[in-house]
Amino acid sequence: MPPQEVGKIWTFIMDQFQDMSILSNDALFDLSLWNYFDFKSSRTNNSLEGWHHRLNFDLNHIIHPHFYMIIRAVQNNYAHNSAILSRHTATSTIPSRKKLFVNRNARLHDLENRYKQQTLTLQGYLEKVMRLIGIKKF
């Protein structure tokens, strides 16, 4: 959603909850940090989720692991990242993203472009984005 539209939709949402119809200017994080409209890079934290999954797997899902188990997990993580870097250096290729996420990202860019060209209303844009990411109702 374009940053200039956030105030309108926020007002609409807050109007549904009565007496909270202002967008706070003293927010903890600036709008540009969390708004992904017109964002050209990765929109997800999948790489972080992958790292966390590998770490939990290396630690056998133990909640409070022993110090030396953590050291071993960090060493395994280093070895994993070194192997990926070596493969990238040798072949000049990076691991491909899942087709689902590539397609979803392309559809999001298409919706943004249609909204920018004013062939899609704000409400239509939001409905299609919600459907795309799996939100049932607004």
Image: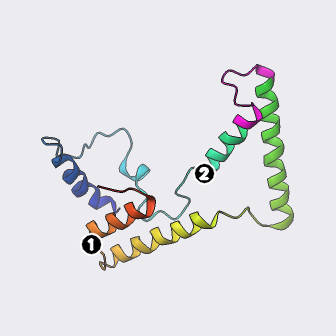
Q: Which mark is residue 133?
A: none
Identify which residue is drawn at 52% across, 66% down.
105
* 115 or 41, nearer to the observer: 115
Separation (CA) of disc 2 from disc 1: 30 Å
Q: Secondary structure at mark 2?
A: helix
Q: Amino acid at mark 1?
A: Thr
The image quadrant of residue 86 is bottom right
18 in relation to 10, above or below: above
Which colour assignment does the render follow?
Answer: rainbow
Magenta stretch: give its range.
56-68
- Where is residue 116? Give x, y as percent: 34, 74
Check disc 1: other Cα within 10 Å, few if <14, some if 14-19, many if 20+: few
Residue 10 place in picture, x, y as percent: 24, 51
Quarter holding the N terminus?
Answer: bottom left
Amino acid carrying label 2: it is Asn
Q: Quadrant of residue 92 in the image?
A: bottom right
**Residue drawn 76% across and 19% down?**
66
Q: Point out residue 110 in the picture as x, y percentages from the top left corner.
A: 44, 74
The mark found on residue 121 in the picture is 1
Q: Would you say 40 lies left or right of 59 here?
A: left
Identify residue for label 2. 46
Q: Is residue 123 magenta?
A: no
User: x, y percentage for residue 7?
Assistant: 24, 54
Which residue occupies 74% across, 63% down?
A: 94
Compared with 128, 60 (above or below) is above
- Name the outermost residue toward the front: 136
**Dividing the image into 4 quarters, which one contains the C terminus?**
bottom left
Is residue 23 toward the left or the right of residue 49 in the image?
left
Assess whether mark 1 and mark 2 are in contact (beta carbons under 8 angstroms): no
